[in-house]
Image (cartoon, grey):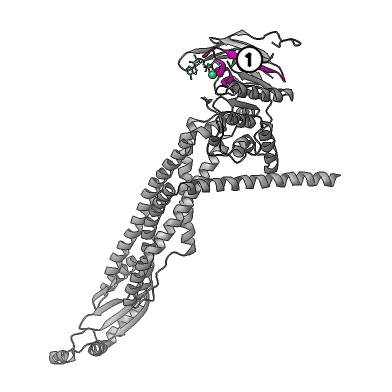
Amino acid sequence: MISFNNVSMRYADGFEALKSVSFQLADGEMAFLTGHSGAGKSTLLKLITISERPASGEILFKGLNLARVLGKNIYRVRRDIGVVYQNHRLLPEKNVFENVALPLRIIGTDYRELAKRVRAAISKVGLSGSEKKFPNSLSSGEQQRVGIARAVVSKPSLLLADEPTGNLDPELSQEILKLFEQFNQVGVSSLIATHDLNLLDKNNKRKLTLSHGVLIDKSERIEGRDAVL
Amino acid sequence: MINQKGSKVGTQFFSGLRFFFLSHVREIKGALSEIIGKPLSTLVTISLIGISIGLPSIFVILGENFLAGLDRIDQSVKINVFLDKSVLVAEGLSLSKEIQDQPDVSLVRFISAEEAIKDFQKQTNLSEILFTLGQNPLPHVVEVVPVSFDPIDVAILVSSLNDLNGVESASTNLGWLERLYGVFSIVRSIGIVFAIIFFVGLILVVAHTIGVAIQNKAEEIELLLLLGATSSFIRRPFFYLGFWYGLGGGLVANIITQISFFPLAAGVERLAQSYQSSFSFDRGGSDTFFLILLIGIFLGATGAFLALSKKMGEINPKRHGYSYK
Ligand SMILES: Nc1ncnc2c1ncn2[C@@H]1O[C@H](COP(=O)(O)OP(=O)(O)OP(=O)(O)O)[C@@H](O)[C@H]1O
Ligand SMILES: [Mg+2]
């Protein structure tokens, strides 16, 4: 699905946030990205959404090198990746339906199809009936589920999440984890950055561990499956 | 089978077309509700546009009207050629024939001194004074209507008539006309100069307003970019915003112009009547109405374009990436 080859990343101030990171995420695989605060988790995700560019190395996604893609290919890559943010990033003046519909509006989906898919995504995250509510009238967990519905509504091939349970209590974290697992079961690859032990300990998915920009652990041996490198 | 396939492609084409229009209509409506949602700032912006287009329009339309009015008054331009006192009636008649033959003269009327004094007596009550003078003080006069009413052509004709043998002096009432012409061309030019200055200012005002709107939506724009929106997708609503501001401003400009013409037109028409002119004030008609609307829309769209190229240049995903924190 995606492969990092010797990727280093340096911020404008010269700080080296990632150091020669290499790993692969297989099609349909779900993995966690973990590590201490400041280890470079968000930085790694930003490279995938082409919000930042690496200083060296290559990031291959669907035959494109994300270190270098330009123009229309940037749109294509971004439309094929769903992202869930810790702070939801919902638009406060748009209701739940319109927030979830955004990715489909962007690709110009016909309204009937759009409405069908938006309702399906909203129901998938258990928020049917809240279509007309505005984000501020929802609880933090509900807002996060709207964010997840928006990330999956356009059926991306890769789902990224940056601390998706950062503000949530353990019970809600579990619910969110279950959602990701459900998407994974229907074949969506996903990479979830987190240091939430509620997520990490309660499943046996692969974990990529970063420390000071270095990938120190690419795989935990998981029973019944070989780690993919 | 082939038919079915063809109709399916057709349906897809039309549904695509429908989507294109529907999504544009949606965005146009979205931009409209955006400006209606902030009535005060919208009112300020639109009034500003309206006044800035309206004021110069008033000048230009007024200038045009006066110039058109003067063109009509011109039709009554005559040159009075006063002959030497020594010229006899027969000589005067042949001289007027000579003048009539000039190519730049359209009509000639010979008025003998006797006719002139009779006219004068009819129009005034000064007959007694004239009788006491015992002698006709008036010369023979040739009234000349020129072919061209252009002030310069008339001036040339007057000076050539002055040069003729037996002519004491030739003159016309054109002097004041010429001066009025000058004044009203200046009125019109002021309108045009104002228009240019105002329009440049306007574009900057609209650009600023839309720039603020873009800034207020920075978060949304950032998100849309991350979701893979093209920059034209992001720009479009702001263009429509400029469109609505321009259209609204154009409407206000038309209203201002028409309202200010109520008292103006009445005054001008009264003035024209005092000159026995059937002149009626031209408020500008539908083409002026649409021209002003178009100017408004053009200025609004240009302002939006400026704002977008300035602000969006800073967040163009093609040039650099985007931090999402
Ligand atoms: N825009 C930036 N300019 C300079 N340095 C940055 C920038 N963004 C992040 N960094 C630095 O890069 C390092 C990695 O940051 P990153 O946000 O990727 O960490 P993280 O693993 O996501 O941490 P957390 O768990 O706290 O979210 C940090 O030391 C951070 O200070
Ligand atoms: Mg982070």
Give how far across and how far down residue A12 sits, in percent: 47, 18
| Rendered view: B119 above or below A142 | below
Res B59 → quadrant: bottom left
Which quadrant of the figure has residue B8? top right
Which residue, as the protein is rendered here, is positioned at the far left?
A: B132
Q: Is residue A33 magenta?
A: yes
Q: How many marks?
A: 1
A181 vs B171: above or below:
above
Quarter where residue A89 is shown: top right
Relative horizontal placement of residue A177, taking residue B306 as reference (left or right): right
Please tell me which residue is depicted at 46% across the width and 56% down the height of the picture: B251
Report the magenta residues as a range.
A26-48
Q: Is residue B294 above or below residue B324?
A: below
Which residue, given by chain and number where applicable, does mark 1 sit on? A200
Badge 1 density bin: few <14, some 14–19, many ≥20, Cα 10 Å? some
Q: Quadrant of ligand 2?
A: top right
Give coordinates of residue B199: x percent, y percent. 40, 49
Q: Residue at x 35, y 68 (%)?
A: B263
Identify the image quadrant of the C terminus of chain A: top right
Q: Position of residue B24 (x, y in %)?
A: 60, 46
Q: Magenta segment: does it hold A131?
A: no
Mark 1 CB lies closer than 8 A to ligand 1:
no
In the rendering, at what x and y percent does residue B6 appear?
80, 45
